[in-house]
Amino acid sequence: MPFSEPTNAQATSREGELRALRLLLPIGAAVVLLISAWEHANGVVSWWDRYLYPLLVTVFAVGGLTLWRWPQYQGAVRLVSVVTVNLYLMAVLLMVLFIGDAPLNQYTLLTTLVWLPFGYGLIFVMLAARPAMFISFIVALLTFTPIFVAMAFNLRPNWGQEFTTTMPVLALSQVVYIVLLLAISDLRASFHRASARLQVAQELALSDALTGVGNRRALQEHLRAGLSVAERGHVPTSIILMDIDHFKPINDNHGHSGGDQVLVQMAQLLSDQLRASDRLGRWGGEEFMVVAQATPMHAALELAERIRKAVAAFEFAHGDPVTLSLGVTQTLPGDTADSLVHRADKALYRAKNNGRNRVEAQTVITAH
Ligand SMILES: Nc1nc2c(ncn2[C@@H]2O[C@H](COP(=O)(O)OP(=O)(O)OP(=O)(O)O)[C@@H](O)[C@H]2O)c(=O)[nH]1
């Protein structure tokens, strides 16, 4: 396979959001349970919360469970959570304000208002920044307008002076919360954009511009990783160095672009022969290399032979047969990337000398 799978920064960011929601929803369920227990213990629970707290706990718990078991329903869970929390907050406020036999005490009103920022937070987690800001302002407006109407017409004479003077400050703080959430949301979006650009830059730095497989630098990293895995795990890493036979005549007969096309097709063909853990790269010119971690020599030789046959049987676009010579070696104690590649090069040299279109192995350490 090519040295790296195509990455999608947006998918990564959605993964992060999913992880956050998987934690957020069960925590929400636990918090509502705690508040409910505390209010029951202190005898301040309102009659509607006796019904609505279990509803909230159920929505959060079922939402959290759904995200763990069936993450494909994430969109529905987001929507249901946002709608439930914000409808709950507004419904409670309206009941506090306008239902005659409700306990219109200041505790219930304040404790409900205190949780409004949690509602905005959920909206910002679930929706994009601009719509989230818009909906949050509507929620704040729908919440505070009835309070100020009640104050203006003195509909709730039992509200004390301190309580009513607190309300404008509380209303203003909603604007601060929403603007702050918008800023955080924008920051998060720019962070995701920057990390997406960084990922693209990293991929470009390690990929071969013509064929899209790893370049020499990527292969050198894979060699280092292979050596350390072999050293720690005591299972050898094998490498296969491959060189297209008589490539110069292909260029001469079909032009440089014809030669390029063979290189591109070759890279694809080689990728198709490999396991996910094998690393393919273009070592240079018409040379490719596979780094196969945790693969002993006999398995690498089988792979090399399979590759050789597949290439010889393949019909390239320019119409002429193409063959590969392959040199195989495996890590030995005390190896460096250079000594490993040197042995593979020796084997490749022998494959060329012995007639090309063949696989040779080198296990003995030879002088450079
Ligand atoms: N089209 C194209 N040709 C390349 C590229 N890189 C190297 N080459 C050509 O590959 C050819 C390699 O030729 P040689 O080293 O003589 O080897 P060969 O003709 O394959 O012969 P053997 O390896 O001995 O079988 C040269 O003509 C290079 O110009 C490339 O990116 N694109």
Image (cartoon, rainbow, N blue to C red):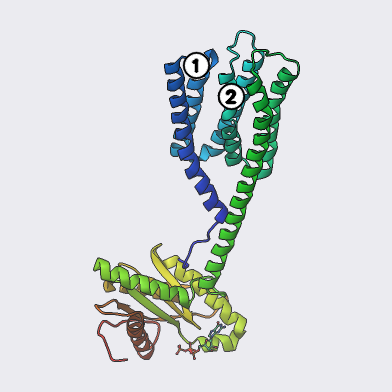
* Amino acid at circle 1: Val
Q: Residue 110 carries which label?
A: 2
Q: Work out which residue is located at the far right of the displayed protein and give it.
A: 153
Number of marks in the image? 2
Q: Indicate the position of residue 37 as horizontal and vertical percent values.
A: 42, 21
**Which residue corresponds to the image point at 29% horizontal and 76% vertical from the top-left?**
330
* Marks 1 and 2, the one that precedes in the sequence: 1
Dot label at residue 45: 1
Q: Which residue is drawn at 75% across and 16% down?
A: 153
Q: Could you tell me how far apart the alpha carbons at marks 1 and 2 are, in whole angstroms?
A: 13 Å
For mark 1, give the secondary structure: loop
Amino acid type at image mark 2: Leu
Residue 360 at x, y percent in the picture:
32, 82
Q: Is residue 206 in view?
A: yes
User: Can residue 207 be seen in the rendering of this structure?
Assistant: no
Q: Return the residue nearer the eye: 196 or 289.
A: 196
Q: Is residue 365 above or below residue 279?
A: below
Position of 214 relative to 287 (above/below): above
